[in-house]
Image (cartoon, rainbow, N blue to C red):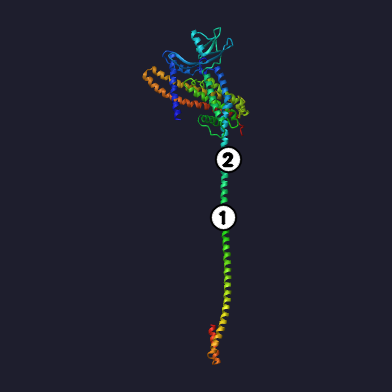
Amino acid sequence: MKNSFKYLLLLLLMTFGLSAQNAMASDEGEESKEINIPEIVLEHLADSYEWHIASYEGKHLSIPLPCIVRSSATGEWNFFLSSTMEEAIHEGGEGATYKGFFFDADHHGKIYERLADGSSVRPIDLSITKSVMQIWIVVFVLLAIFLSCARWYKKRDEQSDAPSGFVGVIEMLTMAIYDGVIRACVGEKHYKKFAPYLLTVFFFILTTNILGLLPIFPGGANVTGNINVTFFLAFCTMLLVNIFGNKEYWKEIFWPEVPLFLKAYPAPLIPVIEVVGIFTKPFALMVRLFANMMAGHAIILSFTCVIFLGWTLGTGMGLGLNAFSGLMLLFMNLVEVLVAFVQAYVFTLLSAVFIGLAHPEHHAE
Amino acid sequence: MENLPSVLTPDLGLLFWMFLAFLVVFLILAKWGFPAIVNMVEERKAFIDESLKNARAANEKLAGIQAESEQILRDASQQQAQILKEAMETRDNIVGEAQHKAEIEAAKVLEDAKAKIEVEKQAALAEIRQQVATLSVQIAEKVLLQQLSSDAAQQQLIDRLLDEAEK
């Protein structure tokens, strides 16, 4: 316990140390001495076609990732490494393209295609970006954890000792969610059907959040702080709620037990509100997770940037702000570990509650 | 839309890969990951419940056995007391009988002895009588030999002598 705490501390120290390096690197790489904190932070939050690790004096150390784009002009699929494209454009100079593709600075550096008439369009872009890579790493981690645990169970039966150590932790977490959240919120009758989805959501978000706190390669991408990811998760929950909702659920939406003038004439007020509610519930899920994770990343990055801002103002200011930021970073990282769990928990809990609400029992009058 | 930060921009590629990755992890974990853990925990729970029930039953059985053994002990001590009592009675009987027998024997012996004594006595009396007769004859002889002066005196003497001899 004490040991693991020490490692955590070391990890956190590394976190802001390395993030600091990153921030400095981008600062040197782009403009002269001006530190544009919002830009640095947004750049680190954004998705990209390469996995940037460090830069020093203009040299970048990054992992190139494969780009998969379908040309709108020819309809062909193109596969290439992001580094290949970057080099080609770098050599070609201003306005150069690689097979007609270029990174559009006006659109967050996304790949755009220049058509023959000079206009630029967004091609179908299925590139393995940093976020996608991070998602697959999470998938790999999850599979490794759970399949190894499953193998542990396969070798034992119900009469053997309960697991200890890592398998014990995973069992404890799984059963805490399974019994405490899924069974409690979905209801005794249907919970088994929804358990795999909700457990997957919980562990997916938890792992993504925690890996997102790592400063370097196997983690650090801002995945749950990207609206596309949270949109997908919330959309899944919305589908599950509405596809498996029973008759009673739909009746409560379109013909609730309220006075007639509220649901039919002059206006079906309550049904309209309920129908809007179908969409606002998952929307809240989506925004909550996105905003919490993005904000956490942004705050950590900002505090890192404050260190460099301080050093541009002089040594005294630099030292003072360094100490301050160090403390705040430590604090924020610890808070983020908590938030990583809480957000995964809340998303699962609310999904379970919404699914449970879609299976109301007949009101006993 | 143009001014949105990158993290808020819809991205088809990311959505597609997210869908695929989530589908993969969901399908694999739903098939092989979570059921292994959940089923094992539930089986273990059932096993523990079963074991508790068995333990309770065993405890009850044990309590029954204890009561039974106590009953057996009580019975045994009762039986022991019974046996002891009977043995005592038997002993008393035997002793009493033996005493009775002994008394009878003793009485018989006494009777025999008495009879014998009687016989002896009779014999002795007879002998004494004979001796007395002999003595009286001798006395008479002596008297006859010495002074047979008067018959009355003689007779008186004989009687007195006889009486004395008889006493």
The three-letter amino acid code for the residue at tag 1 is Gln
Is residue A237 among the parts visible in the rendering? no
Query: Which residue is drawn at the image coordinates 41% and 23% (left, top)?
Result: A326
Q: Residues within 10 Å of mark 2 (few under 14, many from 20)?
A: few
Q: Dividing the image into 4 quarters, which one contains the C terminus of chain A?
A: top right
Vertical order, A364 against A219 (above or below): below
Is residue A229 among the parts visible in the rendering? yes
Question: Measured from the top left, where is residue A347 in percent x and y?
Answer: 53, 26
Are dots 1 and 2 on a single chain? yes
Along the viewing direction, whichever of A245 and B151 lies nearer the viewer: B151
| Discs 1/2, front | 1
> Given the image, what chain letter belongs to the residue carrying mark 2?
B
Question: Measured from the top left, where is residue B146 in percent x and y?
Answer: 53, 90
Along the viewing direction, whichever of B138 and A251 lies nearer the viewer: B138
Residue B122 occupies quadrant: bottom right
Q: Residue B80 bears which disc, if any? A: 1
Question: Measured from the top left, where is residue A78 in percent x and y?
Answer: 56, 12
Residue at the limit of the structure toward the top, as seen here: A117
The total of numbered circles placed on residues is 2
Q: Residue A235 bears which disc, if any? A: none
As measured in the structure, the alpha-carbon distance from the residue carrying label 1 to the one carrying label 2 is: 38 Å
The three-letter amino acid code for the residue at tag 2 is Asn
> Given the image, what chain letter belongs to the residue carrying mark 1?
B
Along the viewing direction, whichever of B68 and A104 lies nearer the viewer: B68
Q: Residue B54 bears which disc, if any? A: 2
